[in-house]
């Protein structure tokens, strides 16, 4: 029986040695993985540092763009104000010229209409005078004719009586 025990112990020692070899292999692999992991962490740290640098640079660029955009907005507003003022002056000048032109046109039209009215009144006055003269002539001629006819009739009757 002691031999069985020794054989069992030898078997256990063999298993322990096999397990130890596997553990050593696993530890070696873990050490290798740890080295690779540390290398990856170092690369990540380097990448993060570069990213932080890029973020600082982008932030600086954004701030300068913001300042430039603000200046551009102010300059554009000033330019639009200048253009608006010039346009208002131009429209004012055009309006003034148009008002002057319409004023002259109105004056000329009123003058022309006044002259036309005068000529028409003179023409109608002449026509009225002519009509009145014609009426008077017709009246005088008519009355004269009636008087003449009446006189001739009276004369004819008077001659018949004698």
Image (cartoon, helix red, strand yellow):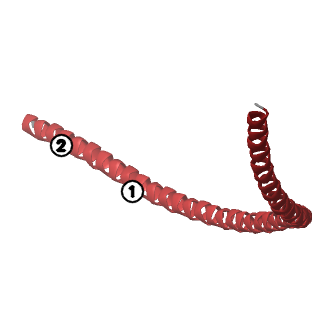
| Residue 144 locus on image (x, y percent) | 27, 46
Name the side, left or right, on which 150 lies relative to 15: left
x, y percent for residue 40:
82, 62
Measuring from the top left, give residue 57's x and y in whole percent: 90, 67
In the image, 48 versus 106, the foreground residue is: 48
Q: Secondary structure at mark 1?
A: helix
Q: Secondary structure at mark 2?
A: helix
Nearer the observer, 160 or 77: 77
Q: Residue furthest left?
A: 160
In the displayed structure, 6 sits above or below 58; it is above
Left/right placement of residue 153 relative to residue 92 reads left
Tell which circle, 1 or 2, labels the residue nearer the N-terminal end: 1
Q: Is residue 117 visible?
A: yes
Residue at position x 81%, y 58% in the image: 28
Quadrant the C terminus occupies: top left
Residue at the location (80% across, 69% down)? 86
Closer to us: 102 or 130: 102
Q: Mark 1 — residue?
A: 130
Q: CA distance from mark 1 to mark 2?
A: 27 Å
Q: Quadrant of residue 106?
A: bottom right
Residues at circles 1 and 2 in contact by the CB criterion of under 8 Å = no
Look at mark 2 in the image and give the residue it sits on.
Answer: 149
Is 46 placed left or right of 108 in the picture?
right
Which residue in the rendered view is the most extreme toward the top? 1
Residue plotted at (16% across, 43% down) = 152
């Amino acid at each position: 029986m002691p031999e069985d025990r020794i054989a069992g112990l030898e078997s256990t020692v063999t298993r322990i040695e096999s397990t130890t070899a596997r553990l050593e292999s696993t530890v070696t692999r873990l050490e290798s993985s740890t080295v690779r992991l540390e290398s990856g962490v170092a690369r990540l740290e380097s990448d993060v540092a570069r990213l932080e640098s890029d973020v600082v640079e982008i932030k600086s660029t954004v701030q300068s763009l913001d300042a430039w955009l603000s200046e551009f907005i102010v300059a554009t507003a000033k330019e639009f104000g200048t253009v608006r003022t010039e346009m208002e002056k131009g429209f004012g000048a055009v309006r003034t010229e148009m008002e002057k032109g319409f004023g002259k046109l109105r004056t000329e039209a009123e003058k022309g209409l006044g002259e036309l009215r005068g000529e028409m009144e003179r023409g109608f006055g002449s026509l009225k005078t002519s009509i009145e003269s014609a009426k008077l002539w017709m009246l005088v001629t008519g009355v004269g004719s009636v008087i003449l006819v009446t006189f001739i009739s009276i004369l004819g009757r008077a001659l018949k009586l004698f």
